[in-house]
Image: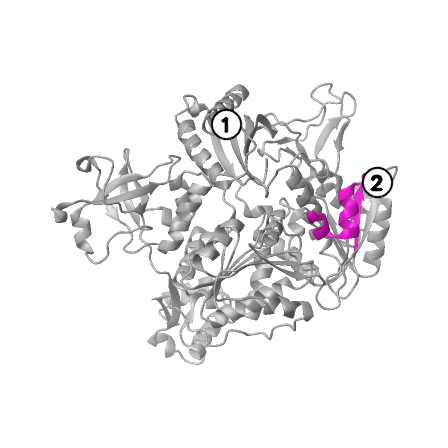
Amino acid sequence: MATNKPFIIRVAIQSPLRQLFDYVIPKTILEISPNQQPTSGCRVLVPFGRRLVVGLIVTCPETTDYDENKLKSIENLLDKSPLIPQELFALFVWAAHYYQHPIGDALFNMLPVTLRKAKPLSEPSTKYWQLTAKGKGLGENSLNRAPSQKALIGHLLKHGRLSHDDLIRLFPRNILHTLAKKDLIKDSEDVKAKVAIKIVLKQVPLSLNTAQKIVFAKIRYDDFRCYLLNGVTGSGKTEIYLRAIEDVLRQGKQALVLIPEISLTPQTQKRFSDRFNVPIVTLHSGLSDKARLIAWTDAKAGRASIVLGTRSAIFTPLEQPGLIVVDEEHDQSYKQQEGFRYSARDLAVIRARKENIPIILGSATPSIESLNNCVTKRYEQLMLPQRAGEALQPQWSIIDLKNVNIEAGIASTTLLAISETISNGHQVLIFLNRRGFAPAIICHHCGWAADCHSCDTKLTVHRARNRLICHHCDYQQAIPKHCPNCMSHDLVPMGEGTEQSEDYLKRYFPDTNIMRVDRDSTRKKGAMQTVFNEVERGEPCILIGTQMLAKGHHFSNVTLVVVLDADSGLFSPDFRSQERLAQLLTQVAGRSGRGQLPGRVFIQTHQPEHPLLESLIHKGYNTLAIDLMTQRRQYELPPYRHLAVIRAESQWAKTAETFLHHARATAQKICPASESITYLGPLPAMLEKRAGRYRFVLQINVTQRSMLQNLLTQLNHVLESYKGSKKICWSVDVDPQEI
């Protein structure tokens, strides 16, 4: 009887449905590989409705709640072994449940795009070129009229077989094809092999100062520990990462390093490749699907010793995990804001615990959550209070904008300081977190303003492109030549953006290299690196840009940092706004004076006496963070309570709002409001209308995480059967970073 029992699998399908589906595997498929039984993490091709789709095996249960005779059979078993190690796969399943996201959609988002299709996973190969017998027998005077072809032949004669990648760095691709047609060279492919690394270092490490030595001596690798490396900007946190990674590599293990932005990848990868003689791969959304798959498989097979990536890299399997590093751990970018709303930083800590390895969270401005975890002894805090080498902390100055002459957002006092810095042969960084020429355009005659037709916001002026653009839905139109209301031609841009400040500075400093760094100016591949290469030359220049400039960059000749508009972050209704502003100002200020020259920071504001600015400048970020922690505790906000937000949007405001009223009523039946649980809303989102849809939120604030999870699990089942659900797009955001 037991031999006739069907092999049942429970499968996740990439869909918005919050359930798994039971299938059976036919004996014919099982008999093909009798020693390789399907298990969790293997892909299968299954019938789903009228389609054949790829599914992931989650469990292999002994029984099913359905009639076994009516279960559909899979079409094909795509993997002979799990794509992801069992323990790591279990973590991914847990993450889908914790963040209350449809499990199939969550699990497939954790895989490279290529593996979400019905294609077998093949080991990547390396293409090589070598001389044919004809090529080896060429006379000395052959190919004299084709010097590039002759040079390539000579290169292969000298070195023998060389990889395709190595050759195209030296010679154009067309030469390879030409010589192949002449039967002078031929190609071959070998499966990538794991290379034994005998020498880990190719560069002598920098000397550690006393504080760095103390910190590094505390790091242990034998089990799970979470270290919060709290070091001021320029204190040498990266050197600690490199030393820790070196220790792990010498053990034959791998390191996973997370960074918040793609723009940081080139310089970080260069620093790592300059130091280590090991294979390094990068993983981020800017890569092609093929390149991501190769990097992913190299990491999985242990061929990559260091994996460097942005948020999604946390899902990369490692053959021999040894260390996880999360740089700029406070950064909001680690939280996915659409779809599967996971926190890469938090998952990194949980993954390190599961794999029993250490993790280092590094920041000059640690998040309130991480600092609280140090207070409760969950994390061990490692302090670097001084800059490395001879560099000193920059000197802060507040520029009071009241009753001051301002042009393009720049005060006269600030302009003089910029001029002085350039005259001294140094560089200036100007921070304005608002791209475009101006945030709005109005009619000077009647007051008309250009609004987005789909969002509750003004259209931003992009003069260089002659466009008005919505930064929320990307609606665009040409800049009108006259007011559509009164036909006046007196249209005036209001406020300042990076474009406007750039234009003004170019007129004021015509002989100075002025470079703008924002999403508009860095669209082309390599544009960001081109700017940084210019800065690294050390010649006088002015950098102006958004928060893309604030994170992790090392500019040794920048001696003046200017924050044009500090006021925009002082009055936000989001309870995290003051923390974010303090982090941003500290990070931006940290780009100044990182070399041997002293640095200055100018903060332009209409609120010079604001408590946050006073505390940040005179006491520093860590003291300010303690004050913010006290406020959070008083107001019963994270990390002292646990928060979830249910978001709903619809073409009709009433529909979205009614849905959330239903959600609140249902939730209160499950868990009535009390001291342990409070409800707020439904309320309009901070941007109520976006892309033609009205958005509302419902906040749930709970004392215990388990209570929140139980409530949301039950609530989701009810909301999925809501009658008007087809007219509503709704989602659950656990541990939200934005309200």
Say how many tags the image has: 2
Amino acid, disc 1: Pro
- Position of residue 595 in the picture relative to residue 9 (left or right): right
Q: Which element is circle 1 on?
A: loop
- Give percent across and percent down for residue 648: 51, 28
Residue under numbered circle 2: 401
Comes first in the chain, label 1 or label 2: 2
Q: Which one is in front, 726 or 181? A: 726
Above or below residue 197? Residue 460 is: above
Q: In which quadrant is the C terminus drawn?
A: top right
Q: Residues within 10 Å of mark 2 (few under 14, many from 20)?
A: many
The residue sitting at 50% across, 72% down in the picture is 147
80 relative position to 436: left or right: left
Comparing 256 with 129, the one in front is: 256
Residue 416 on image: x %, y %: 86, 50
Question: Which labelled disc corresponds to residue 672?
Answer: 1
Question: Badge 1 local density, few (<14 within 10 Å), some, or many (20+)?
Answer: some
Q: Which amino acid does the dot numbered 2 rest on?
A: Leu
Q: Give the magenta part as a residue range.
A: 600-626
Q: Which mark is residue 546?
A: none
Residue 585 located within the stretch drawn in magenta: no
| Residue in the foreground of this view, choosing between 721 and 109 | 721
Q: Is residue 590 left or right of residue 358?
A: right
Q: What secondary structure is found at the residue carrying circle 2?
A: loop
Residue 693 image offset from top left, x and y in percent: 54, 26
721 or 56: nearer the viewer: 721
